[in-house]
Amino acid sequence: MNHRTTGLRVLAMAWISVGLTAACASASAAPSVAKRIPEIARSIVVVQYTAENEFHKTNKLSGQGIVLNKQGVVLISSDLIPQDIPLDYIRHLKIRLAQGDMPKIPAEYLGRTVDGLFCYVRALKPLDAPPLQISSISKPSLGQRVYSVGRLGKDQAYGAFVGVNRIKAMIPLVHTLIATDSFGLTDANSPVFDYRTGKFAGVTVPNPGDGMVMSLLGRSVPVTLRDNQQVGMFIAYNSIKQDLTDIPTKRFIARIPWLGTLDSTGLRSAVRKLYNIKLRSGLMVGQVIPGMPAAKGGLKSRDIILTVDGKPFAHTPVATLMVARFEHRMQQFKPGQTVKLGILRNGKPKTISITIGQAPTPPSRLPRYYDRKIGLVVHNLAFIDTYSRKLPLSQKGVYVVLVHNGKPASLGTTPVQPGYIITRVDDHRINDINGFKKLVTQAEATPGKPEIVFEVIKGDGRTAACHVSLD
């Protein structure tokens, strides 16, 4: 809800106003839609916070949320609090009501959904906003007319507005994505309903933009049109049912199922023909990470996965969609459960059992340390930090997140760079941020010590020494 494109917004709002007026005059369902809008709008609030890093650089962010229960739990898009923002950066989290003096209610972050689409926040004081009522469900269909309710930006006093559109495509990716005409629905994270029956259909997703080609001075120039208050896609309720019904009561960390494979691809028609595979379902395994669940279960690179627990996981010949459907099937498991994969290995059928693991902790959720004197922010090593450099998973050290310009770590002939892994401090091995903090503070407190020497591993895997002056 920041940085709006005013011209597009005005045109879009005018279009919606005209479209809704025409719809009300011509469709018998319109009066019931108009009657429900104020009720639905009361369940839509504004969530805002300030993101502030260790260097006190700030960014104010806001977006709309859907009230889920009487305890004040609100569902927001994961785009509002991205995965890579450390939780310590979230300051002044508020839920704002679009009524009266638009009061601000202090809130807390609870966690992220397993599918990564949404986050939950909870009001720390009573929230004078009713939960969204989901009494009956509409199954989306091509040509179906739908409407959504959202809130305008702060400069429009967070007023409610409506989008009306028709479904033009249904795309079975990891989630079932429903496409309508561009800019027809309201802001991301808006509830969507069937226009005729009023049944709940899903939730809008952030706008990827609409591509077109313009002719400019004799040249064809591809451009993308985007209006953050107008979107053209939503996710069907059946794909996100758990997110809307399994509402958390306290802070949590999502346990995301994980096999421990990378770069797998959908099965090409030539491969199906080569091995006489009749099923459309198929996945060519890419990298199998040593020591992870897939490797422990016996899966190997270039194995072809055909079934999950004895059933095909896809019914499409499109290779990219096979990958999406396999990921969707895996999301239905929980860490600790066992899955049986029917595979082909060198053309021979085989069934293997794998105990599903939990995805590694993302870097943004790892402990961090900021040394103010030398201007360095580090966190404990994440899986991706070591694996991307082909380092052993047992690798010790800390990862450099930020370097403060003008501070000692950024100066000299061998400055420290973000993305480096520090493995030694003055020839002493370090395991984590606790060891790093201890050695660096000791060095800084040593009278007459001219510098600290960090042994580092660069992004390309090469080692180097960085000399940081203490003068």
Image: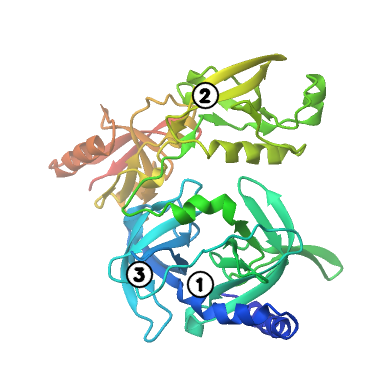
338 vs 450, left or right, is right
Residue at the farthest right position? 218
Rendered position, 195 above or below 234: below
Q: Are marks 1 and 2 in contact (CB under 8 Å)?
A: no
The picture quadrant where one finds residue 53 is bottom left
Give 67 or 158, whichever is nearer the viewer. 67
Rendered position, 175 above or below 21: above
- Amino acid tagged 2: Ala
Give 7 or 65, whichever is nearer the viewer. 65
Q: Earlier in the sequence, mark 1 or mark 2?
A: 1
Q: CA distance from mark 1 to mark 3?
A: 16 Å
Q: Residue at x 75, y 38 (%)?
A: 316
Q: Secondary structure at mark 3?
A: strand
x and y, in percent, of residue 410 in the image? 36, 49
Residue 294's disc is 2
Q: CA distance from mark 1 to mark 2?
A: 43 Å
273 vs 370, left or right, is right
Q: How many marks?
A: 3
